[in-house]
């Protein structure tokens, strides 16, 4: 492994510890639930999920789980 790559690995480790450097504005995820797989998206603060429950409630277990996983980074984006 060359020294420049080692430097990048160290820098990535530092960045990962400094979560304030990141704000997520959009992403797409495949969520494998108990009753099927669903595409979940986040765009400019708005969630969407392909599951039937989301259509009537604008939230579901899939979006809420991802909110918990990404809570720190998404909360920062909502206040920015």
Image (spheres, grey):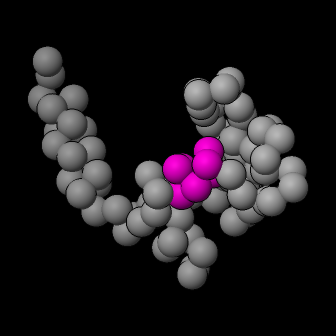
Quarter of the image for residue 52 reads top right
* Type of secondary structure dominating the magenta stretch: helix
**Along the line of sight, which residue is nearer the eye, 1 or 36?**
36
User: Where does residue 28 sit, x and y in percent of width and height?
Assistant: 67, 40
**Along the line of sight, which residue is nearer the eye, 5 or 19?**
19
User: Looking at this rendering, what residue extends furthest in the bottom direction?
Assistant: 79
**Residue at 78%, 39% in the rendered image:** 51
User: Where does residue 37 sit, x and y in percent of width and height?
Assistant: 67, 25
- Magenta-drawn segment: 61-67
Quarter of the image for residue 39 reads top right
Q: Which quadrant would the C terminus be assigned to in this image?
A: bottom right
User: Is 30 within the magenta?
Assistant: no
User: Where does residue 31 sit, x and y in percent of width and height?
Assistant: 60, 33
**Along the line of sight, which residue is nearer the eye, 18 or 55?**
55
**Residue at 72%, 57% in the rendered image:** 59
Q: Is residue 17 left or right of residue 22?
A: left
Q: Is residue 16 left or right of residue 78?
A: left
């Amino acid at each position: 492994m060359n020294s420049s790559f080692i430097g990048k690995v160290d820098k990535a480790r530092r960045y990962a510890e400094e979560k304030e450097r990141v704000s997520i504005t959009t992403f797409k995820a495949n969520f494998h639930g108990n009753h099927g797989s669903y595409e979940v998206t986040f765009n400019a603060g708005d969630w969407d999920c392909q599951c039937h429950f989301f259509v009537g409630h604008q939230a579901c277990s899939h979006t809420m789980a991802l909110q918990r996983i990404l809570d720190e980074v998404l909360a920062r984006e909502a206040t920015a």
